[in-house]
């Protein structure tokens, strides 16, 4: 079976925030395809990270597109600010959005790729009526809020179900991204399940050499995909 190339999206959540430029360059030198930026508001998740001004600074140094993951209760209110800051992909949690169809259309109208994120306890079936409209789906394989948590294996069943759902909806172009606890021990299983965008934070930025760690994950994913 011929597959689309697997994209690696290093999450800067585990990088040194005082040296983000160097961390991003290291990941890019290792073959990063995207930079994953985790935005947390202290309400939807029990942690606070960064907002549009930092994304704007990151945009100045990054050579690859920015994949911004909003873990906030009111993404509609901030989507324009993230678009202006340079986000290329913007993902929003299904759990906070009563009018998800409108939000997805709004994100696209701002010129960004629109992604919908599911927490580990949110069933794949909740996506059924939005599957035809998304640019990508992000499956959380940990409970969002922190880097360095343990991978939840049940997430992979969800990936396979969502892949089938996207294809049924005529949206084979939409990719599935996975986020949380990914490392060299489980990346192959994720790719086999149908993941095409792999987020990795601690496996890259807690490693002694972020470039080498990115490269190793990319090679491990490519070995499955080829
Ligand atoms: C968790 C974030 C993740 C996190 C992943 O809430 O959404 O992107 O940085 O980190 P690891 O790869 O360490 O689980
Ligand atoms: Zn994330």
Image: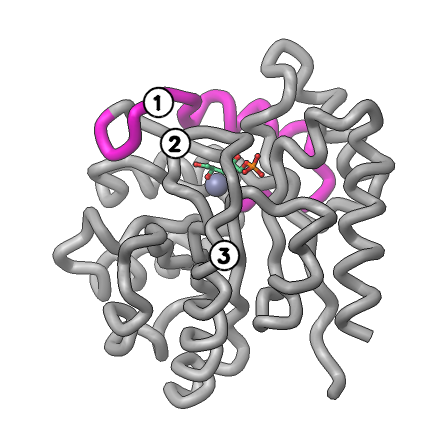
Mark 3 neighbour density, 10 Å: few (under 14) some (14–19) many (20 or more):
some
Q: Would you name the residue on which mark 2 appears? A: 145
SS category of the residue bearing label 1: loop
Tell whether circle 1 marks a residue whose Cβ is less than 8 angstroms from ligand 1.
yes
Mark 2: few/some/many CA within 10 Å (<14, 14-19, 20+): many
Cα–Cα span, label 2 and label 1: 6 Å
Magenta part of the chain: 43-67
Taking the spot 39% from the left edge, 81% from the top edge, the residue there is 165
In-image side of 78 versus 57 (left or right): left
Question: Residue beneath label 1, please?
Answer: 47
The front one of 186 and 76 is 186
Residue at 24% over, 34% down: 44
Q: Is residue 62 magenta?
A: yes
Q: Residue at x 50, y 34 (%)?
A: 149
Residue 207 at x, y = what percent? 76, 27
Ligand 1 lies under 8 Å from the Cβ of mark 2: yes
Label 2–label 1 contact, CB within 8 A: yes
Q: Which residue is mark 3?
A: 153
Q: Residue at x 43, y 51 (%)?
A: 140
Which quarter of the picture shows residue 83?
top left
Q: Kindly indicate the quadrant of the structure image that contains residue 212.
A: top right
Residue 79 covered by magenta stretch: no
List the single residue furthest toward the top.
18
Q: Earlier in the sequence, mark 3 or mark 1?
A: 1
């Amino acid at each position: 079976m011929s597959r689309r190339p697997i994209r690696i999206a290093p999450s800067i959540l585990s990088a040194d925030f005082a040296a983000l430029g160097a961390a991003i360059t290291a990941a890019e030198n290792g073959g990063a395809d995207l930079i994953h930026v985790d935005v947390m508001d202290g309400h939807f998740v029990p942690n606070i990270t960064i907002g549009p001004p930092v994304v704007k600074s990151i945009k100045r140094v990054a050579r690859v597109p920015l994949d911004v993951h909003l873990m906030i209760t009111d993404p509609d209110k901030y989507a324009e600010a993230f678009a202006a800051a340079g986000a290329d992909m913007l993902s929003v949690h299904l759990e906070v959005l009563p009018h998800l169809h409108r939000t997805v259309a709004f994100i696209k109208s701002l010129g960004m790729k629109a992604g919908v994120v599911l927490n580990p306890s949110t069933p794949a079936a909740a996506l059924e009526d939005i599957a035809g409209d998304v640019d990508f789906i992000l499956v959380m394989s940990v409970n969002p809020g922190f880097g360095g948590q343990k991978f939840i294996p049940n997430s992979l069943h969800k990936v396979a179900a969502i892949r089938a759902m996207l294809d049924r909806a005529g949206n084979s172009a939409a990719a599935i991204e996975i986020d949380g606890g990914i490392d060299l021990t489980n990346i192959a299983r994720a790719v086999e399940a149908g993941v095409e965008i792999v987020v990795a934070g601690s496996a890259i930025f807690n490693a002694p050499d972020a470039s080498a760690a990115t490269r190793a994950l990319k090679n491990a994913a490519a070995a499955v995909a080829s």
